[in-house]
Image (cartoon, rainbow, N blue to C red):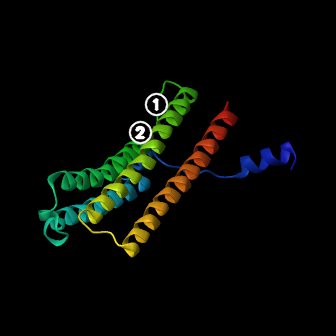
Amino acid sequence: MEFNQLKSTWDAVKTPSISAIEIRNMLSENKHPVLKALRKQLAIEITGWLIFIAVYYSMLDGAVKPLWINLSLIFSILLPFVHNLMGYRLSKNLIYGDNIQKSLRNFLSKVKVYAIVSIVSRQIYLVGLLLFLTYGISLNANKLLFLIIAISCFLIQFAVLSMIWKTRLKSLKKTITAFY
């Protein structure tokens, strides 16, 4: 397509007229569809984990396990909350600088930190849950095999999550670099 054709096509597109009030409403935190979906996901997860924390003590024999095992389980469950809150905050505040280039660089550095928190918090959560569920169990051959498989799955998940975040960050960095 030649430049003149592209320009005439661009000029022919009619943009919808939206008032400043409508734009302000769309950008508000309560109306933004992505933030609304994140808040809904966060509420569902918090409710589920609070129910789990409320019943684990009696249903999963938390009462007979040492305090440090119970605290490690609660700590490992709280980490996904921190991760989700960081993700919400990152999605909510997208402008981190005086100009767009500085803002994009700052955003990339914040996404890098978020990626590390995402990977580490998930692994700590899984280790804490596994520690709680396996504490005090006498291991026979079948249980040991299951434990080895579970740990292998954790390592595979760690590798996959690392590759996914590495690809995302590389793509984001490439997009930001192309913007300059």
Q: Residue at x 38, y 49 (%)?
A: 121
Secondary structure under tag 2 reads loop
Q: Residue at x 77, y 51 (%)?
A: 9
Residue 21 found in image quarter: top left
Number of numbered discs overlaid on the protein picture: 2
Dot label at residue 151:
none
Q: Residue furthest bottom?
A: 142
Please, is residue 55 above or below residue 17 in the view? below
24 or 38, which is in the foreground? 38
Residue 82 seen from this side: yes
Q: Position of residue 130 (x, y in %)?
A: 33, 61
Q: Residue furthest front?
A: 140
Which amino acid type is shown beneath numbered disc 1? Tyr
Q: Is residue 141 left or right of residue 69?
A: right
Find the distance from the CA under tag 1 to the CA under tag 2. 7 Å
Please, is residue 118 above or below residue 156 in the view? above
Dot 2 surroundings within 10 Å: few (below 14), some, or many (20 or more)?
few
Q: Is residue 176 left or right of residue 81?
A: right
Dot label at residue 96:
1
Dot 1 surroundings within 10 Å: few (below 14), some, or many (20 or more)?
some
Q: Position of residue 58 (x, y in %)?
A: 13, 69
62 or 102, which is in the foreground? 62
Q: Residue at x 61, y 48 (%)?
A: 167
Q: Is residue 115 left or right of residue 21?
A: right
Residue 27 seen from this side: no
Q: Residue furthest right?
A: 2
36 or 149, which is in the foreground? 149
Which amino acid type is shown beneath numbered disc 2? Asn
Q: Which residue is mark 2?
A: 93
Q: Position of residue 70 (x, y in %)?
A: 19, 56
Kindly indicate whether the residue at mark 2 contacts the one at mark 1 (C-beta within 8 angstroms): yes
